[in-house]
Image (cartoon, rainbow, N blue to C red):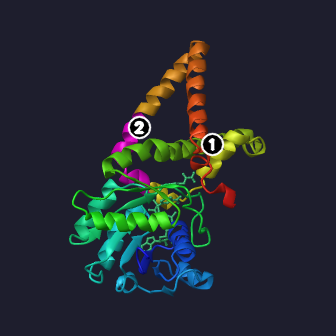
Amino acid sequence: MLPFSNIAIIGLGLIGSSIAHSVRASMAGARITGFDADPTVRARVIELGFCDDVSDSAGAAVTDADLVMLCVPVGAMAAIAAEIADDLPADAIVSDVGSSKGSVMEVLSKTLPSARIIPAHPVAGTEHSGPDAGFATLFHDRWCILTPPDDALEGDVEQVKAFWEKMGANIEIMDAKHHDLVLAVTSHLPHLIAYTIVGTASDLEDVTRSEVIKYSAGGFRDFTRIAASDPTMWRDVFMSNKDAVLEMLQRFSEDLTALQRAIRWDKGDELFDLFTKTRAIRRRIIEEGQDDAAPDFGRSHE
Ligand SMILES: NC(=O)C1=CN([C@@H]2O[C@H](COP(=O)(O)OP(=O)(O)OC[C@H]3O[C@@H](n4cnc5c(N)ncnc54)[C@H](O)[C@@H]3O)[C@@H](O)[C@H]2O)C=CC1
Ligand SMILES: O=C(O)C(=O)Cc1ccc(O)cc1
C-alpha cells in the first residue's frame, strides 16, 4: 500500500527532483504534480519528464494532493505557504525538506494554521542544484529527521515516515530545537568554515596568482566542493538558524583561539592530543559504517 497517492512537489531543484525520481522508482502508481516559481525550471522538468504534471501555479499543483512536499529554500517557505493556503485540501499532509526546522515550522503553522504539518529534513544532498541535479538514490541509507509538532497525529507521522522509508531513508524523530542545534554543528558550521576558507584563499590569490588552484590538495579541494553549494539556500539556512549557528560559532572560535595559542607557544603536545582525539572520532564513524554519510554526500553520483 502506498503512503500517498497524489504528491505535490513544490520547488523542483536538487531535492524536489530527487524525491520525484525516487517516488517513481519506489512507489509505482503514485501521481506526482510539480510546481516551481521559475518558468525555465518548469520547462526543463517537462523535458526531463519526472513529473506526471507540471502546474503553472502553486495553488493548482496542490488541489488534489494528499501530500504537499515543500522543497524551496527555507527563506521562501512563508511565501509558498501563503500561495497554497486557499487551495490546500483539508486532509492533505504538508511537509518540507528545509535544512533548518524551528523557523520553518513557525512560518508554516502561522500561515497554514489548520494544516497537518509534519516537517522533515533529509540529511542528504550535494553541492549541485536545479532539476538536472536530482537522482533516485540520493536518500538511500541516509538519515531523514522528522520534527513533528507536539500535537501532530501519530498516523500522520507514520505516513510520512513510511514515505521516506520507501525512498530508502532511515528515520529519526526529534524536536525542531534539538535538530537545529545538532545540524548547526554537523552541517551548518562546516559549510560556514568552507565558505570562509575558500574566500580567504581567493583573497590571497592576488598575491599567489593561480597557485591556490594549482596546488589545491585534498583538504582544500573538499572545502571548494562544499563552498560551491547554492548561495540562496545557504544564506537562508544561516538567517533562519541564527541562534544555534551563533552559539556553535562562538564555541568554535574559542577552540580556534586555543589552537592558535598552542601554536604560538610551541605546545605541540596540545595539538597532538587534539588530533589524536579527532582521528578516533573518524575511526568510530567508519566502524559504525557511516563513513559515507559525512563528507562525501552524493559524490559517487558525479
Ligand atoms: N541541497 C542540499 O544538499 C539539501 C537541501 N535541503 C533543503 O532543500 C530545500 C531545497 O534545496 P535544493 O533542492 O538544494 O535547492 P535548489 O536550488 O536545487 O531548488 C530550489 C527550487 O525552488 C524554487 N523556488 C524558489 N522559491 C520558490 C517559490 N517561492 N515557489 C516555488 N518554487 C520556488 C527554485 O526556483 C528552485 O528550482 C532547501 O530548503 C534546502 O535547505 C535539504 C537537504 C539537502
Ligand atoms: O554536500 C554536502 O556536503 C552536504 O552537506 C549536503 C547537505 C546539505 C544540506 C543539508 O541540509 C543536508 C545535506
**On-image quarter of the N terminus:** bottom left
Task: Give the residue at x 53% y 41%.
Answer: 193
Q: Does the magenta stretch include residue 245?
A: yes
Amino acid type at image mark 2: Met
Give the tally of numbered discs. 2
**On-image quarter of the C terminus:** bottom right
Q: Residue furthest right?
A: 214
Neighbor class of circle 1 (other Cα within 10 Å; few <14, some 14-19, many 20+) is few
| Place of residue 298 in the rendered image (x, y in percent of width and height, measured from the top left) | 62, 57
Task: Give the residue at x 57% y 12%.
Answer: 265
Image height of 291 relative to 261, above or below: below
Image height of 2 relative to 109, above or below: below
The CA distance from mark 1 to mark 2 is 25 Å
Secondary structure beneath dot 2 equals: helix
| Place of residue 89 in the rendered image (x, y in percent of width and height, measured from the top left) | 29, 82
Neighbor class of circle 2 (other Cα within 10 Å; few <14, some 14-19, many 20+) is some
Residue 296 falls left or right of residue 218: left
Q: Is the magenta stretch mostly helix, strand or loop?
A: helix
- Residue 72 in view, yes or no: no
Mark 1 or mark 2, whichever is nearer to me: 2
Mark drawn on residue 248: 2
Residue 150 falls left or right of residue 242: left
| Place of residue 27 in the rendered image (x, y in percent of width and height, measured from the top left) | 51, 76
Amino acid type at image mark 1: Asp
Secondary structure beneath dot 1 equals: helix
| Place of residue 123 in the rendered image (x, y in percent of width and height, measured from the top left) | 49, 54
Image-quadrant location for residue 57: bottom left
Residue position for label 1: 203
Q: Residue furthest front?
A: 1
Which residues are the magenta region?
Answer: 236-250
Near-viewer residue (206 or 157):
157
Q: Does the magenta stretch include residue 63?
A: no
